[in-house]
Image (tube, rainbow, N blue to C red):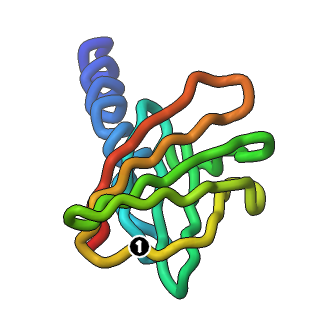
């Protein structure tokens, strides 16, 4: 009987991470997802604006007191967009990000080590 209970608990525990991170890595706002350690950032660009949504294991990650910079590499052109807090778990800035550009995101959250993530805007 104990073996049966153990086997059932082991099976349930093994499937839990897949359920907990079902949306992990999937864009929620129409942008591109970039990972940085335990943080996940979705970069959404359009109409001369950039919004970065920050999450940690699917939960909103507070951006109060944070700062950031998005480096945009488009062929031989390089530009930088400064990012500032813009709500509970967002950073925002003004700038153009062309399709196909390579992105380097640097984010400093209050009281934490700086994070760096890379992505390509499709």
Q: Between residues 59 and 54, which one lies in front from this camera angle?
A: 54
Q: Position of residue 87 (x, y in %)?
A: 77, 61
- SS of the residue at dot 1? loop
Asked if 79 appears above or below 41 in the picture, the reply is below
Left or right: 57, with 31 as reference point: right
The quarter in which the C terminus is drawn is bottom left
Residue pointed to by mark 1: 97
The quadrant where residue 6 appears = top left
Q: Position of residue 98 (x, y in %)?
A: 34, 77
The quarter in which the N terminus is drawn is top left
Asked if 45 appears above or below 14 in the picture, the reply is below
Hey, which residue is sitting farthest bottom in the picture?
47
Q: Residue at x 30, y 59 (%)?
A: 73
Q: Between residues 98 and 87, which one lies in front from this camera angle?
A: 98
> Can residue 23 be seen here?
no
Asked if 29 appears above or below 25 in the picture, the reply is below
Q: Residue at x 33, y 47 (%)?
A: 118
Hey, which residue is sitting farthest front in the picture?
76
Q: Position of residue 71 (x, y in %)?
A: 42, 53
Asked if 71 appears above or below 75 in the picture, the reply is above
Q: Position of residue 15 (x, y in %)?
A: 30, 39
Q: For the residue carrying disc 1, how many other residues have a C-alpha within 10 Å: few (<14), some (14-19), or many (20+)?
A: many
Left or right: 6, with 109 as reference point: left
Q: Residue at x 63, y 65 (%)?
A: 93
> Can residue 80 be seen here?
yes
Q: Residue at x 71, y 42 (%)?
A: 66
Left or right: 43, with 12 as reference point: right
Q: Between residues 57 and 110, which one lies in front from this camera angle?
A: 110
Hey, which residue is sitting farthest top in the picture?
2
């Amino acid at each position: 009987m104990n073996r049966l209970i153990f086997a059932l608990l082991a099976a349930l525990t093994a499937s839990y991470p897949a359920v907990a991170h079902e949306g992990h890595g999937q864009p929620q706002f129409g942008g591109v997802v970039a990972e940085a350690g335990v943080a996940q950032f979705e970069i959404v660009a359009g109409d001369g604006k950039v919004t970065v949504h920050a999450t940690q294991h699917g939960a909103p990650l507070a951006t109060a007191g944070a700062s950031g910079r998005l480096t945009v590499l488009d062929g031989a052109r390089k530009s930088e967009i400064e990012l500032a807090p813009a709500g509970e778990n967002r950073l925002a800035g003004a700038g153009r990000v062309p399709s196909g550009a390579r992105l380097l995101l640097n984010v400093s959250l209050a009281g934490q080590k700086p994070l760096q993530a890379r992505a390509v805007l499709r």
